[in-house]
Image (spheres, rainbow, N blue to C red):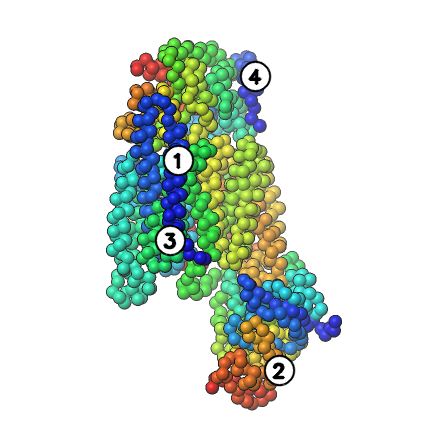
Amino acid sequence: MQPNRRQFLALAALLAARPARAAGRLAVIDWALLETTLALGVVPAAAAELKQYARIVSEPIMPQSVIDLGLRGNPNLELLSNLTPDLIVISNFYDYRRASFERIAEVLSLPVYLTGEPCLPILRHSTLALGQRIGRPEQAERLVTALDAAIADLRLARRPDGRPAMAINLGDRRHVRLFGGDTLFGGVLSAAGYRNAVADTRYSMTAPVGLEALAREAEAELFVIGPLPPGGGDALAGNALWQALPQVAAGRVHLLPALDHFGGVATATRFAKLVVGGAAAR
Amino acid sequence: MKALPASWLVVAAVAAVVALAAANHVMLIDAVSTEAAGNRAFAAIFVARAELPRLAMALVAGAALGLSSALLQRVLRNPLAEPATLGLSAGAQLALVIATVALPAAMAYPVAVAFAGAAATALLVLAATARRRFEPLAVILTGMMASLTATAGAAAVILASGDYMTGLFIWGGGDLTQDGWGPTLRLAAILAVASAGTLLALRPLALLALGDAEAKAAGLATGSLRLVVIALAVWLAAATTAEIGIVGFIGLAAPLMARLTGIRSSTARMAAAPVFGALLLSLADGAVQLAGHLTGLRIPTGAATALIGGPLILALVPRIANLTRPDVLPTPTILSRRSAGPVLAALAIILMGAIATALLAGRGAGGWHFDPANMDWRLARVSLLGAAGALIGMAGTVVQRLTGNPMASPEVLGVGVGAGAGLSVVLITAPFAGLAAQATGMMAGSVATLSVLLAFVRRHGFGAERLLIAGIALGALLSSILTSVITTGSPAGFRLLGWISGSLIEPSASMAMGMAVILAGLTPLVLVYARPLAILPLGETTARALGLATTATRFSLVLIAGAATAASTLAIGPMSFIGLIAPHLARSLGLGRPAAHLIGAMLSGAALTIWADWLARMVAFPYQLPLGLFAALIGGGYLAVRFARGSHA
Amino acid sequence: MEQNGPDFALDGAGFSAGGRRILSPLALRLAVGHLHALVGPNGSGKSTFLKLLARQIAPDAGTIRLGGRLLPSFGSRAFAREVAFMPQFTPATDGMTVQELVSLGRFAWHGALGRSSPRDKAAVREAIERCDLTAFVHRPVDALSGGERQRVWIAMMLAQQSRWLLLDEPTSALDAGHQVEILDLVASLARERGVGVVAVLHDINMAARIADDILALDGGNLVFRGGPADVMRPEVLRPLFGPHVDVLPAEGSRPAVVYMR
């Protein structure tokens, strides 16, 4: 059974109400919470799939001391138990193997994304709950405030022409992933008052669709989230189909650096700032 | 079979292709067009640079696959030869994946890279079957093994580089989306050159069809002709794979259509194969696009052709007479027999060694260590895998004796994938289904698959080669369903991917206990059937003459094998090959009687599984690779060697 | 209904496949303790007839009884205790030794689970001795010569200790000397143990040499039935085997030799 949003928010609020404790040794499996942990000023002892993380998340830099636990979907539990963490932080994506983590240490599971639910409220509450649990409640408040400020800025920077927006990622020369309302980027755009032109996505795996899907919303602002496919910007320049897209032809495309699609509040803030920059640059 | 006039069939197919293209075009324009001015410009460019090239690509790639298959079928005298069944496509794909990860500079020449991979696979398959004079069944089985091994290798490379998402594209291969005319024109040029080559080779090929001796007597250098023609076919297959990924079974269907239309002359058939290939791939791609427009589901074209190709092979099998060459087989295979006791004792000691390695040796944050510190983690894992390996060894032995064919196995017969199909049904209905529901789904899936297979071959005579081909077809069909589910990107797909990677369940003491209970329950049950398992390899007639109630016995054994397969695939994934290798190994060690054979296969299965898993966890530490991939690599190598030595198959 | 031991009784039993009549309905009786030979040209329905008796296929018309019981009413093992059947093409034996293969003949008696009793062991030993295979017991069957292999399969049937032996061209792969050896073995069994034998024989002279009762089939019909002396006449054989067939008297009790004029 999938708990609904209200239950999650109630749970998050409950967690947030508990008194703050010291962080201790942390192991973080979920990337959104890993990013949040670092943003809260705590360096975990271990985290999952750091090779790929380094490829996608350029800042903040992952400290060398953090030990790689292997794939997020299949972390090395033996290694994890040898590291004797005090707390293992997971998200609802990893709840199905919670029992295994509980054999090793106390587990904190916080919701990050739920299919069909706007994610920013969930992420806000989870950020506050994590801050509370690892003894960084003020920093957590600050993170959330920073996001709100960035979104407010974006709201101001947004041109009042009612243009819809689309956040996308280029899978390869011919395919894109679209970020709908239940995704991080879609959530930020909606919060800033954009109409998200992407009707529907299934967040967990964002199946790629053909480039032509973009043409359906010819009027939209296009925010392209990195990384770009092999060949990068040069390949896009030589791609006649891409160049012919109405948004590209009209110069309403903003190439953004690589961001974690499954990131947390800090990524959301960064995205909002980048969009402001992009919108201003035009 | 009544022959349809060729022109009618072609006209109908062309009409269908045009109708599909028109429908897709209308839907596309409808979806794209708004009042915005820029949009109309885009639509025009999209038609010119994406839609038309895609249509052309389907025609060109289909023709290339059809021609490649026709050449292979001709020169190997094998009605089932084509790039997918010979493993050429998978070999090309593996080379492309390795180059992408390890040697990105080489990817400037994708066709060359793909050719290297496909040619290496072709050499391997042909070298392994040369001693059997390229007997069709042996070639297909070896090709399939090479194909699965290459696929496993490609997945291992991707996972080892720590990228889950790209893995999806491997599984969802065969995509014809275009963004310009470049790839189509490149492939068309290659097709033109290869067609010219084929024209030159037509006459010598006709001579070759008379037989090697006759061709040689007429002054033909048969060896070099074969080499040149195979190289042409491999080049076509590699180029197609490099441009659009793996699209299987087109080459099987094209000659069938040629036969349906009553084309008799072999030259005419050679000319017809690319035409029908082009039409078939265009039809499949048009249908896939239409389905995408109507339902929003994106089925990879490669998965769709497998979906069509699977049933097609099933339909073809009863018509295929010459899968084995009686003139190749008569040397009786005399397996050495040893007394069971010492062999089983030796196997038990080897198993102990595997257990000790897996329990004591490992890597940690500080490097290698040999100590019992992590015993509690490892004990559960080793027991779970040992029991699962024993179960799949048991299932393999049962299936091999049931069919009287040592090449049969739960994996080769598609039973493991069938379990996955059952699992996907459960996960689609209830994405967060519990373990019991998942296990039930897998059990139902594997039993259903085995039953369909047995019913099929029953109807068309219990020929072992038919069972194997039907199993391959069914396996292809079911994997294409899995692929489609995985590429939807739904939670069900995510969990299926995890299962295929062998990480569905976390080894825990209770899990290991459960597996051990299943093992303990099934072992005496299967040993009860020791005598029937000795009789069944003698065939239906003899078994009945001896008083065996064959239908009831087969039914019970299918259930036992299905349960054992379902339980073990839960832990070790669908394509481990251990169900194939373990009984083979026990057999080649001289264990001939069913009880000893069963126990030997169970011991070997347990040891192989534990070792494969240990390797999978150590090689890319701390990244844990799927154990099935390692087992497939080991298994592919083992079988290639066995085939090369020409021992029993 | 009159009942003399476990005879086969066919009552209108026939068989067709794919809309073609393979065997026309037959009404006849086969007595236990006799050697019945089925002769006739290729495609005459001999093998089909034998498979009907062996319950390998079911008649699509009429009934077949054994000892007054309808064939379908027998359990699998019970039927195998009554009737042993050897197909024309014996399968590969999967590496089994002579001893192992012959022991499988006892399956009808001990089943899947029953222990192998002294009686089972004695039956296997006797069958092996009877077929002169003692020297080969531990050899793989696949490694033997054609004649030896055929003897192993006959030994397996003997170990089955059934009252009927059904053989489909048991000597197809053998030279004349070995044919005589095997068929004499079968004939002597019929006489010594009161076992009934039905054998498809392609060599009419062999049939005349060993059979008590010869059934000649042609085009799925029973065209003639009688003892060797009745059958071995040109006017009986010519319609079956063509106008060039003729008969010579032979020495001894057996009457004739067929040759091509």
User: Mark 3: which secondary structure?
Assistant: helix
Q: Which residue is mark 1?
A: B24
Both marks 3 and 1 on one chain: yes
Q: Which residue is mark 4?
A: A10
Q: CA distance from mark 4 to mark 3?
A: 70 Å
Identify the image quadrant of residue C71. Answer: bottom right
Callout 4–callout 2 Cβ contact below 8 Å: no
Q: Residue at x 41, y 65 (%)?
A: B327
* Whether residue A18 is situated above or below residue B208 in the rendered picture: above
User: Mark 2: which secondary structure?
Assistant: loop
* Whether residue C32 is situated above or below residue A34 in the rendered picture: below
* Whether residue A275 is situated above or below residue B176 in the rendered picture: above
User: Mark 1: which secondary structure?
Assistant: helix
Q: CA distance from mark 1 to mark 2?
A: 79 Å
Q: Position of residue C125 (x, y in %)?
A: 61, 70
The answer to whether any part of residue C135 appears in the image is no
Q: Which residue is mark 2?
A: C227
Q: Residue at x 59, y 49 (%)?
A: B559
Callout 1–callout 2 Cβ contact below 8 Å: no
- Judge left or right: residue C46 versus residue A190: right
Q: Position of residue A257 (x, y in %)?
A: 34, 22
Depth check, front residue: A132 or B75:
B75
* Whether residue B502 is situated above or below residue C50 in the rendered picture: above
* Type of amino acid at the residue the image marks with label 2: Gly
Q: Nearer the viewer, mark 1 or mark 4?
A: 1
Q: Which residue is mark 3?
A: B6
* Type of amino acid at the residue the image marks with label 1: Asn
